[in-house]
Image (tube, rainbow, N blue to C red):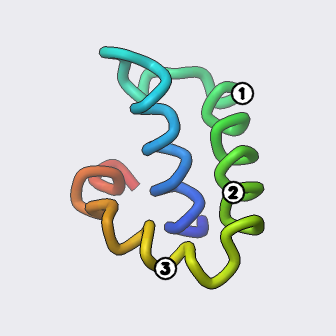
Amino acid sequence: MDYRVELVARAFYDAEEDGYSWDCEPEILREEFRRLARNAIALMGDEIGVLVLELSPGDYLKAA
């Protein structure tokens, strides 16, 4: 699993889904957010490093 994709996907999810748990969502929904994250990462290119630094891996990857 690409940690950048997971971090960005979970950040998108948190921004969109108010009060729900990522871990309780169906895989199909999580995969949709991962697809969006991969697209965003591709569009941002080298700038994705700045975003990843701002996201806390401890907050998003506890269950990984």
Q: Position of residue 51 (x, y in %)?
A: 44, 67
Q: Which residue is mark 3?
A: 49
For marks 3 and 2, give the CA distance.
Answer: 12 Å
- The residue positioned 49% from the left and 24% from the top of the image is 16
Give the spatial CA distance, label 1 vs label 3: 27 Å
Q: Amino acid at mark 3?
A: Gly
Q: Which residue is mark 1?
A: 28
Q: Circle 2 sits in a helix, a strand or a loop, which is it?
A: helix
- Dot 1 or dot 3, earlier in sequence: 1
What's under tag 1, amino acid-wise?
Ile
Q: Secondary structure at mark 1?
A: helix
Please report contact status of discs 3 and 2: CB closer than 8 Å, yes or no: no
Label 1 Cα crowd, 10 Å radius (few <14 / some 14-19 / many 20+): few
Q: Which residue lies under the disc numbered 2? A: 40
- Would you identify the image quadrant in which residue 55 lies? bottom left
Left or right of residue 49, residue 36 in this image: right
Relative to residue 19, is residue 33 drawn left or right? right
| Secondary structure category for the residue under label 3 | helix
Which residue extends farthest left? 58
Q: Residue at x 69, y 78 (%)?
A: 45
Q: Quadrant of residue 29?
A: top right
Q: Crowding at label 3, few (<14), some or many (≥20) Cα neighbours within 10 Å?
A: few
Q: Earlier in the sequence, mark 3 or mark 2?
A: 2
Residue 59 location (% of width, % of height): 24, 51
| Residue type (three-letter) at the residue carrying disc 2 | Ala
Q: Residue at x 55, y 73 (%)?
A: 48
